[in-house]
Amino acid sequence: MSLPRALQPALLRSCVPLSRGQDVDTNHEHERPSMNLSRYRLVAILLLCSAAGVPGLFGAAEESSAVYQGLKPDEFMRRWLVLRQVSVPEKSEEAKKAFAVDYLKSVGGETNVQPRAGETVELDGSNHRWRLVDSRSDIIDLSRAGQPREHVTAYAWAEIEMAEPASLLFGIGSDDSVKVWLNEEVVHEHWEDRATHKDEDLVQLQFRKGRNRLLLKILNMDGQWSFVCRPLSAAGLQENLVYLSGRGDLDGIKKLLDRGVALNGKDKRGLTALQTAKIYGHKDVADFLLTKGADAKIPQPSPKQIVDATFREIVHDDGPGAAVLVAQNGKVLFERAYGLANVENRVPVTTATKFRIGSITKQFVAAAILKLNEEGKLKLDDTLSKFIPDYPRGDEVTIHHLLTHTSGIHSYTGKSNFFETVRSPIRAEDLINSFKDDPYDFDPGKKWSYNNSGFFLLGHIVRKVSGKDYGVFLRETFFEPLGMTNTGVHEATAIIEHEAHGYSYEGGAVRKAVDWDMSRAGGLAALYSTVGDLYRWNEGVFGGKVLSAASLKAAFTPVKTAESKGEDPKDGYGYGWGIGSLRGLREIDHGGGLHGFTSFLLRITNENFTVAVLANSATPIPNMDTSGLAHDIANIYLADKLQPRPTTIANKSVSPKLYDAYVGRYDYGMAVLKVTKENDRLFAQLTGQSKFEIFPRSETEFFWKVVEAHVTFVKDKTGKIIKAIHHQGGQTIDAPRLPDEAGVGK
């Protein structure tokens, strides 16, 4: 059901979007008082570079400035003086013009600025202060609590002392556009809406002996706002080659090989480019690498080694973490934990750590409804009015509608005042009363739209029908028989042993996440569990110990709505589970997320293969995408069982003159797809993701090369584009065109 990693918005199936929490570590940013320098120590980190390194010393010279004594290859620059929140116009073309403005003219200009921490600059009538950012992450997050981060520009400045002149290749990534100065010259500029990825731009920089001034200017249009920067060695370029092979980026691979990057070198996980291309099914890339002399006989690390190295690179020992389990045919193949369950007290995550699992809860509540149906205590075509007689239009909504997100009832977690209340307890009846009079989003059964109200109502129905709280019913009916001793409904007043605390990563720091009272989540997201218990659950479900064959067939049948066209869908959403495919193999899955927690549970049914990934950070720490990581694991373990990705060739007969009609925004429900045109090329960018080029298959159908997905643009009788239909992994998303906004340019 979920969109693969390259096109999946953060927490696509999450309970709710996320907001900021409280600081755990607030010392990542320093402001030097102008009158009391004695509060700050001078810190000199004097580490000799290796013979293969860059001449000079590595490290920050003093706590109140961003000075480096030399640069170490592949070491990310985490210490900068930052000046931010310079507003730019919303319109794309006007923003591009504003990006060219020298906002620092009053203090020497962009080519000659020499700031100090705490120094104030007046811009457009407002004072802006240079602040020292000492990030705990490689990626420098430029957002700050309580301040806007859309349509804004920031500067980041650092000084590098070099013992000898050096020509260094730098890898730079930014969200969105970036401009770079070294000393008095502009050395790089990239204008694009994109997400931050390390080494996206490769720039050759000529450093002179002595002092060098490096200045970056980063513009953000919307969404995240960050950048990443480091000098690259041959090993760093090698990492890029392997990374691009996993993405199937043949053009990028060719550029790196032209730079002389070793064809058979390995990344930090011990994988070569050829091995990675094969793991992810990019046969065209693998064939190309073989023609260039790639060695197919190099031993490949075991799946355990690859997965372990992947998580060790993402999770730091001093921050929030994750637990992972992989199993096949009833045998656990991999089960490990990383990072901290409680950052303040340095309590490590273990495989017994209990995480809140968010919307994975939905499949448990769906199973409870199906069990009651098996027992004859309710029917799936029973109407909502049978259980809540005064519910508006309740005689039109069935349990089937609630289970499949097709009821049209407005999701209460999307209401503007919802986050103001999540910390306080509430009775189920009172919460239902808070949304039952809201207008419907559409007529019941007309279409599919992810809906949390439906599953809260289902949890309430379980209680009314069974005479037991849904948590008690789940424990007695499923958890105890399956030996799931570490799963239950989270209650704020209960003491839960080995419980993970939830965190948010923003502004380069780990913060305490908003702590929900889970009475606000109920049947949609209130459970906690462990990776081991989720494995037992999957074994029970797919082993026939939870529901009858007829119930499972119903649960795993994608819903068909009034708007569905043609044959019954093969993939989509059933009863609390997503149904899709992974390169030819059937996948049943669901993700979850709420403040402080993200999770994903999948089953590849053909192979009796389970992956569970639980994490205690949301907004997550960099690269902690539980859905993407779960699918990475499936690719790694099942590489020889999965089909190659299809190679699609663009239709060169389609004229770029047609592209103007497709430029605009399309509503994907919990995300927006923005389509733009640049120099006769068409690009698409989903909320929170990078911008990727899409290629014509016909005059109205376009495809992505980085992922198996395509989109069809639909016209009305007048020829105007009215919507886009997105196809991916067997799932179809009907995305109406949104009104044009100033920021979408051609």
Image: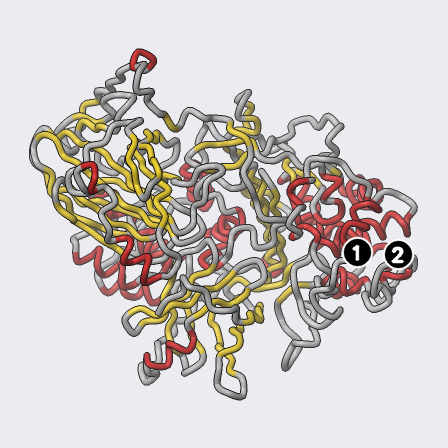
Residue, far bottom: 717
Counting residues from the N terminus, which is met first, the one under dot 2 or under dot 1?
Answer: 2
Residue 298 appears at what percent x and percent y?
30, 50
Which amino acid, by three-letter code, is at mark 2? Answer: Ile
Label 2, label 1: how many angstroms apart (C-alpha)?
A: 10 Å
Residue drawn at x 35%, y 76% as measured from the top left: 649
Residue 276 image-quadrant placement: bottom left
Give the foreground label among 2 and 1: 1
Residue 436 image label: 1
Which amino acid, by three-letter code, is at mark 1? Answer: Lys
Residue drawn at x 75%, y 38% as measured from the top left: 489
Q: Which residue is mark 2?
A: 388
Seen from the viewer's position, the closer of residues 440 and 322 is 440
Residue 449 appears at what percent x and percent y?
65, 63
Seen from the viewer's position, the closer of residues 132 and 205 is 132
Q: Is residue 448 left or right of residue 80?
A: right
Residue 259 appears at what percent x and percent y?
16, 54
SS assignment at label 1: loop
Residue drawn at x 66%, y 44% as measured from the top left: 534
Residue 685 image-quadrant placement: bottom left
Contact between marks 2 and 1 (CB within 8 A): the answer is yes
Residue 66 image label: none
For disc 1, the neighbor class at 10 Å (few under 14, some 14 to 19, many from 20) is some
Q: Is residue 354 left or right of residue 644?
A: right
